[in-house]
Image (spheres, rainbow, N blue to C red):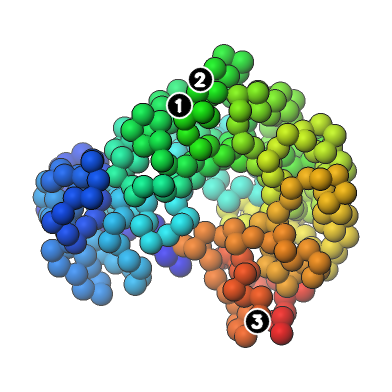
Amino acid sequence: MISLRLKAEFEKNHYPPFVVKISSSDKYSGPYENEKTVAKIVDQTASFLQCQSSFGKFKILLKDEDEYEGDVLLCLPETGKIQRIFRANSQYNSILFTERCDQMCVMCSQPPRRTADEWRFPLYKRAFDLIPPDSRIVISGGEPTLYKEDLFNILNHCAKNRPDIGFQILSNCQHLTKEDIESMAELHEQLDIFWGIPLYSHDEENHDLIVGKKGAFNPLMENLFLLASSGATIELRTVLTAKNALDLAQLAVFVADHIPFISRWAIMAMEPIGFAKANREQLFYDHSLAPQPLNKALDVCKFRGINVTLFNFPRCTVEEKYRGLCVQSISDWKNKFLSECKGCKEQEFCTGFFEWYDSKWTWEGIERVT
């Protein structure tokens, strides 16, 4: 597993948090790179990376053999920690905008916490200035729109300074209003923004039960239309669990009838961490053993013209005719393959497994495809 949070030793640990880009070169490659924003690598071993910056020297204590050249780091001298905001050698880069959330989804992989996050936002602006051209960033949470004004402020900053950056924003879509349409429309004209919005059932009561918030369904539906009216590209997201497996085909019909304007529907296998791990007994559903609900939903999508994909589903666990819908969706830093995968002809195209997948979550249909 690749580490995104690292320990570090700072020569000047009294400094407030700062952002730098790591480089082994004396040359600056972007308009925002200078002696204040770039930390030069001056020494490197298998166990540490020594850097020189305008904030003093600091040593990153390495946990793995990953590459660090070109990474953009959020450095926290007082706590001796570093967060890798952008990994230059990866196409999977995401920022945890906040850990606060107003929902308590029963399978949440990132359980909410009461945190003070405002101090991070100016630093994120600086970080976005330093990432390579044409990069793509996922903004996740928690719920990013709890800090809607700050989120829009950062996006406006990028629209002016880094319009080449593409964003995917993961949101429960509870906090948008009609007053936001104009500003969102301007952002969607200037930036490539892809919104990922969860809907777990066509049944209002069941959706609210899954997200742990009574009355969440109706604002979600209203705000999906608000998003669409602002020119947003929308990916609908549904995590498959025992609580909504039997709703899946009806949800497919509901999507086709009521929200056909979505760009894509992503049906997702559950990530076995966080609340999902705690609630395993009530949530675990083996789609490889009982594929009928999923297959029926996929057939509805084909018949009704819904663009559907399967996230987090190893290809061997779905029927062969649906394997083309599986995409490589698990971020590389938390991805693994099992011993059963060795020699599988599908592995090159397969999403694999989450790092924390183990025998307690075993799908019966896992097998090497030869």
Instruction: Name the residue beneath numbered marker 2.
Output: 183
Q: Quadrant of residue 235?
A: top right
Instruction: Name the residue beneath numbered marker 3.
Output: 344
Quadrant of the frame with the C terminus: bottom right
The amino acid beneath tag 1 is: Phe
Residue 325 in sight from this viewpoint: yes
Q: Is residue 136 above or below residue 347?
A: above
Question: What residue appears at the point 81 percent right and 45 percent down from the top-left corner?
Answer: 305
| Label 3 Cα crowd, 10 Å radius (few <14 / some 14-19 / many 20+) | some
The amino acid beneath tag 2 is: Ser
Structural distance between the alpha carbons of marks 3 and 1:
45 Å
Say which of 60 and 67 sits in front. 67
Chain-order first, disc 3 or disc 2: 2
Horizontal side of residue 99 vs 277, given as left or right: left
Say which of 87 and 264 sits in front. 264
Q: In terms of secondary structure, where does tag 1 sit?
A: helix
Structural distance between the alpha carbons of marks 3 and 2:
49 Å
Q: Does the CB distance between marks 2 and 1 fall below 8 Å?
A: yes
Q: In terms of secondary structure, where does tag 3 sit?
A: loop
Q: Which mark is residue 296?
A: none
Residue 103 in sight from this viewpoint: no
The amino acid beneath tag 3 is: Cys
